[in-house]
Image (cartoon, rainbow, N blue to C red):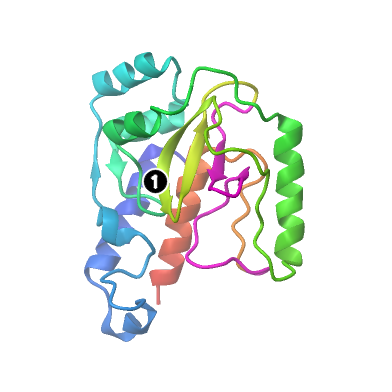
Amino acid sequence: MNTDALAAKLARLRAIEEDFPESLHHLRRYDDKFVIFGAHTHLYRSQPQDEAEVTAAEADLGVEFPPDYRDFLCRVGAGAGPYHGLLDMAGLRERAEDLKPAEEFPFTRADAHRVHQEWRGWVRDPEGGWFKGIEVRSDLPGCVAISEQGCSGFTMMVTTGELAGSLWDMDEWGWMTAHGARSGRPGPDEVIDLGPMPTFQAWYDAWLTESLKRLTP
């Protein structure tokens, strides 16, 4: 999977939503124009980020973005994506003001594997509660927000340490390794498991694949 393949899937997804079959109108939720959660925010539109601007953001933050994320930003752009879409460089900088992206990310590979296994156990037997992950403060160093999930949640990209390049889900309750974006609570048969160290490309492709599956008769 590469940037061109992701762009092609995104184009298919946009085309389907723009010419949505009448027979599938029951998939729409409430009065939303779109079936896929968060699409009303980004409208499946992406704006390529100027490479010089991306480089300037990296310099200001004191980090280097993972190659797959950087390439996607420059060639496809910010906007369309999981949840409410990918933040542009201005949005990413704004969200990073209270963070310290160049400092050491506090979690280790062992932490990632542990919380991932705990999450898998919760999916098999949720016990009526909500999985909170690692319950620590929201403003951890060594990461930046790349997507807003809503309800205080963000998808965070690790920028330092042994987990650099991996994605985490963060909200006011805690942190967990990122899983594929879905609308609604995942059940045992609805999990998009990206493993303990999900990359940007795997995360974005999971959203595209699941969205296309939902919209294809």
78 vs 151, nearest the viewer: 151
Q: Amino acid at mark 1?
A: Leu
Q: Position of residue 100 (x, y in %)?
A: 48, 22
134 vs 49, nearest the viewer: 134
Placement of 86 over or under 29, stated as above or below: above
Q: Quadrant of residue 31?
A: bottom left
> Residue, x 37% and y 50% (percent of image)?
81
> Residue, x 50% and y 17% (percent of image)?
102
171 vs 165, nearest the viewer: 171
Label the magenta part by its dominant secondary structure: loop
On whether residue 214 falls in the magenta region, the answer is: no
> Residue, x 28% and y 56% (percent of image)?
41
> Residue, x 65% and y 26% (percent of image)?
106
Q: Magenta stretch: give its range.
A: 163-189
The quadrant in which the C terminus is found is bottom left
Q: Quadrant of residue 4?
A: top left
Q: Is there any visible trace of residue 160 in the rendered image?
A: yes
Q: Position of residue 13 (x, y in %)?
A: 33, 60
Relative horizontal placement of residue 134, taking residue 139 as reference (left or right): right
Q: Position of residue 120 (x, y in %)?
A: 73, 56
On whether residue 168 falls in the magenta region, the answer is: yes
Instruction: Give the residue at mark 1.
Output: 6
Q: Position of residue 128 (x, y in %)?
A: 70, 71
Relative horizontal placement of residue 109, taking residue 211 as reference (left or right): right
Q: Is there any visible trace of residue 44 in the rendered image?
A: no
- SS at badge 1: helix
